[in-house]
Image (cartoon, rainbow, N blue to C red):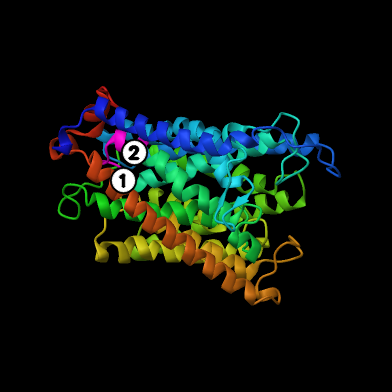
Amino acid sequence: MRKNFNLRTTVSLAGSLLGSFLLVLLSCATPVFAATGSQPNIPAFSPGNIAWVLASTALVLLMTPALGFFYGGMVRKKNVLNTLSLSFVTIATVSFIWILWGYSLSFGPDAFGGLIGNFKYLGLGGMGANRHSRYAPTIPSFVFVMFQLMFAIITVALISGSLVERIKFSSWVIFTVIWLTVVYAPIAQWVWGIGGIFEKMGVLDFAGGTVVHISAGFAGLAGALVLGKRKGYMKENIVQPNQLGYTILGAGLLWFGWFGFNAGSALAANSVAASALLATNTAAASAAVGWMIAEWIRNGKPTSLGIVSGAITGLAAITPASGYVTPLAAIVIGLIASIICFSVVVFIKPKLGYDDALDVFSVHGVGSVWGVFATGLFADPLINKAGRGLFYGNPGQVWIQVITIIAVAAYSFILSFIIFKAIDLVIGLRVDKDSETMGLDITQHEETGYNL
């Protein structure tokens, strides 16, 4: 019965859910729309800091279309357009939700003991173009809102790599709205929000190892398990990249955008930003070389896909540590990440048999678990006085990192599993077998990626 739901039914259901949610939020938020009073002792806006964070925002936005190309090159040609579209529609959907309630729940004043933000900034009410950010007083609040929006966008888009070639486009859009609200927003508040439970504990996550990569990686694993394997997976050769040139292009643009992702997270044009930029590039290079050597040893030849996969692994691993560690530590983090993630992709995943199509869990989830843990080891107070790891006299930091990893991974996996299951029960999550055979470009969009 559910498989006969048409697009009108799907849109009607989504509209009803969205309308009800907005009414509830508006009823809670109306009293706090008035702007707050003056903000004494706030430093003046810094044109340099504003310019850097604006530029970083644009760099991080570029990462999501780049991710689309990175993913799009690895799928079969009958699914390339759909794969690109999953990333692109995420930009629009998350941007819409972020303004209405996503930012307020993620970075609004603490509610419920550090579990989630309140509704003060619903619709960005109470903010103005000249208001200083609570998180970076030398830049306007609107700049911080936009910068953090780009992180929310790419976090959701990352999950699509686990689900490609078999998820309904309509189900993906609905998942995006729900997941951003009930998974991403609370985790962002826990780790980055003022008064968040792990922020108060002192967790070190400079640019999103937990908030972005662990949450996306474990959500992708949950989605892959609910969706099931692609038709013919591990029985016939369905790994047929349609254009690895797209993947290499996407990886290069991701590397480029990651400078804004990590160095921009300093929220200022300062020495911490410079250090994060250096650590980011170093770890990416280290991991690319490490993955290449691993392939050379195992297969006798390195592959272009392996080299770029290694680079992305290093970038994911260094994200939480980038503003805290030395260049030498970045080399170690990147190399170890490449070995761990290569082993998961090549040895562990085939034995377990789950179909994480483009290795979101193996690269982003596993890579950032190591990266967050390594931050607790290598954080150097001479790089950033806000962080001191085990090797610099603070063994307690490791336990804080471990607790945060476990909590974020478990929460994202469990809630994502429930969300995927609920969508599957209501409208169906997966395309039918005929659509999967024909390809999602034509069956989901009435278009084709190639006209040859």
* Residue 65 seen in the figure: no
- Report x, y in % for residue 118: 58, 46
Q: Is residue 143 left or right of residue 114?
A: right
Residue 339's image quarter? bottom left
Q: As shown in the figure, which amino acid type bears the numbered disc 1?
A: Leu
Q: Is residue 278 left or right of residue 412?
A: right
Q: Is residue 372 left or right of residue 144?
A: left
Magenta stretch holds residue 14: no
- Residue at x-position 22% and y-position 51%: 229
Which is more toward the observer, 192 or 121? 121
Work out whether mark 1 precedes mark 2 in sequence or the reverse, and give the earlier one. Answer: 1
Which is more toward the observer, 323 or 186? 186
Residue 305, placed above or below residue 287: above
Magenta stretch holds residue 168: yes
Residue 107, placed above or below residue 130: below
Q: Which residue is mark 2?
A: 172
- Residue at x-position 71% and y-position 66%: 380
Q: Which residue is mark 1?
A: 163
Magenta stretch, residue numbers: 164-174
